Structures are given as structure tokens and as C-alpha cells.
Amino acid sequence: MKKAVSVLLALCLAIALAEDAGILGRPLADFTATDIDGNPFTLSEALKDHDAALIHLFSTRSEICALEGPFLEEAFARYGDRVAFIALSCDPEDTEQTVRACREAHGFSFPVGLDEGLELARTVGADVLATTLIVDRFGNVAFRYGGIFKSVRELCSVIEPFLGGDYAQTAVLDGIPAVSATGVFPVAASREVRVDNENIKPVFFTNDAPPTRLEAWIVEDSVAHVRMELPASDNPYDMVCYDANGASLHELPTLLNAQRDAYVLDAPISGGGDGCFYTRVCLSDWTGKDPEGDINVYLIDDEASLDALCEHLGKEGWVLSEAGGGERAVQPAMEAYVVHVVDQYGDPVPGAFVTFCTDSACAPVLADENGDITFAGAPQVYHVQLQRVPEGYSFDPDFEFSTGDAPDEWLLRVCRDGK
């Protein structure tokens, strides 16, 4: 299973293997493609009444590529009147039938077709993994990305720069912009995944090769409430959760619950439907920096499914643990309210200044050299306001958040300027 997960992440994170042939900032040769309904799409014509064109090259055989389909459709719904969209398969094994089925499965409203002869793919240096280009209003390639967008936020962040009325000359975007908005996120002692339903039974598997421990959960309900927690060292915007059965991909901040105490995914239990007797949920570092830290959990609906899961995992060396894997260590209660201040890249920001306020008084606290703010106030709900950050950083002056009624830990993000 570990090998399969590593391969899947490699596909997610892959940059197109071919070089971009120096196309960034240069005109893209005009082309005409025909979609699967027989309608022509000519780049020069599309740019006459649009601010930009988004060209998405893909393969219908890539399950992980399919996970970004909803992001493309949502972006088209937002920008279709200003940006011309077209998706073309650059997989020589794809046919009109497979591409049509892909369009119907994702409900794409924009043109979808085949890159006949793979001419466009060769021109822009794409392979069968997803490659996305944005051609600006001047006909120049302003953005090229070989890989999978992990959220509609990411996709929109590379479209917006080319739509402003003051966009007067080609400006190349050389990567996906980091999130600069001020935000606060819950922090736990370690990276962890568990199920919060009441009618559950955890089971554990062991393996001689790392990772040596795997969890599965028998869930009597039709939907499992999968709860994920991150330590302060994890950048939430680097983390994703995906249903490995191919149903969904989520940038972790989109799963933050209203109480801001955890990230929660409501995952349907397969229960044998469509020939699959389990749902596998993965929490992963999208950057690929920590592949050993990926956490996979299996969700099943009854003991019969457990027997099938044992057989399935047994082929990869996993053995059901008769001892049950042991109970999780109980983390000691927090003794102070702790806020870790970081920038959009996850680096600590020393010298940030916040106040912890009640209805009657406010206590000012300064971040130390590690960007940590520690407030040892009496347990109650505090209103936390960010008052000041060091020179070279900025924040939303209206940002604030409330603690719970007991000491806890948070990650507070501000923006490093000029990046």
C-alpha cells in the first residue's frame, strides 16, 4: 500500500517531464482544435472577446488528474465570460469516446476534445499528466503548470492576475502564489486521523516494513466523520485530504469546521457498492517533503468487510493485530493559551503583538524569537486581536478570533511582504 500511495503522490506532484521549450512570456502559435461535438476552437478567435485563454492538457486514464475536474468546472463558472477554457487530451490512448465519457462524468460546460497528433503537447512540453497553460490577452504564454491543482483557490489564484483592467503588458507568473491572507488554524500535538462517529470500532494492522501500523474503522453509519489534526510544524495549505477511491480532493483549510478545533471530512462508507468494500482516506503533505508522514485509514461497514480487507491488505504484508494496536496516548492538558505566528511559507514571525481580551480587560503579549505567543491566563473565552507585526509583514487589521474556554494551541498566519 505504501508503494501505491507514493506513486499516487508522485503523479500528483509531477512537473511535466518535458521542458517548456522556453515558451513562457512568448507567443503561443495559433491553433485550432475541434471539440467532441465538432465545434472548432481557435486560440486567436477566442482571445478577441476574452481576457485570456486557459488550456488544460490531460489524460482520462489518470484517476488523480480526475480529482481536479470539479475545480476546473467551478473556475469556468466564475470566469467563463472573461476566460476561454478548453481541455484537450494529450494521451495517445484516449479516444473520442473516452473523452466524451470524461466530460459527462465531470459535467464540464467548456469545450473538451483531443489534441490531434499531440502537436500542442509537444509545443508546450506536456506529457500525459495534466498541464495547464494560461495565454494572456496578447497571445503570450503567461503561466504554465505541470501537475494537479489541489483546490479551486489555487486555480483561481493563477487566473486572477491576468484579468485586471491595468494588465497592459505580458507579466509571467512563475508559480502558484502562496496564500497571504491572515488566518488562524487549530494545532495538535501530532499529525493524526481518527473517526468521530459514535458507532465505531477501530482495528489495527501491523507490517514489518514502514509504516508499521495502519488503522481501519468499522463504522455502522453511512457516513464517517473523519477528523484530522496537524502539529504547528505543518503548513495547512501544504496539506491535502483525499478519498483514494477517486471521489474528492481537499485542501485542508477547506475542511476546517465552524468551531475551528479540527479539520473534518464527511466520507461515505462504500459498503460494497460498485464492487468496492472500503473507503480509503489519505492525509498527505502535497509538497512531497514528508512522504513517510502520510496517514491512510480504511473505512468499512461490518465484520464481513473486515475479512475482505484483511485479505486485500495481506497481499501487501499487513497483518491484523490481535492486540488491537494499543490505545493512543492521552495528551496532557494545555496549561496556557499558545499562538504560533508564521508567514505564508510557514516560517516563524518573531515580534508579533496580540492582545487577549475579556469584557473587562486586555492582556498584551509579544511573540518570542520562535514566533510563539504564550498566555497563561485563567481558563475562559478570550477575544484575541492581532495588533502589530514586524516591519516587512502585513495582516488584515480587522482579523480576530475567539479561544475556547480552556487553554489550547493555534497557528496564526500573516503575510511576508514582497514575496
Image (spheres, grey):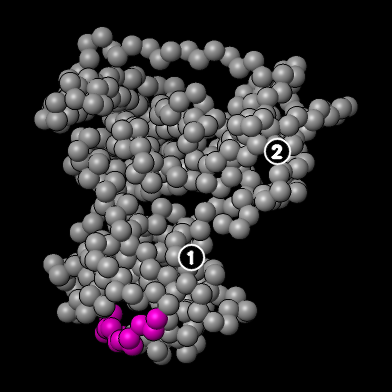
At 29% from the left and 19% from the top, the residue drawn is: 203
Direction top: furthest residue = 323
Give the answer, above or below, for where 316 lies relative to 256: above
Give the answer, above or below, for where 43 lies relative to 185: below
Q: Nearer the viewer, residue 314 or 387?
A: 387
Task: Indicate the amino acid at tag 2.
Answer: Ala
At 42% from the left and 70% from the top, the residue drawn is: 143
Residue interval drawn in magenta: 26-39
Residue 140 quadrant:
bottom left
Task: Indicate the amino acid at tag 1.
Answer: Val
Residue 280 quadrant:
top left
Nearest to N terminus: mark 2 or mark 1: 1
**Residue 76: x percent and y percent?**
45, 69
Q: Residues within 10 Å of mark 1 (few under 14, many from 20)?
A: many
**Residue 78: x percent and y percent?**
52, 68
Q: Nearer the viewer, residue 385 or 314?
A: 385
- Mark seen at residue 158: 1
Q: Nearer the viewer, residue 183 or 106?
A: 183
- Mark seen at residue 352: 2
Q: Nearer the viewer, residue 138 or 322?
A: 138
Please say if the residues under marks 2 and 1 sit with CB atoms less than 8 Å apart: no
Which of the image's four quarters has the C terminus? bottom right
- Mark seen at residue 65: none
Which of the image's four quarters has the N terminus? top left
**Residue 310: x percent and y percent?**
17, 25
Task: Determine if residue 87 is in view.
Answer: no
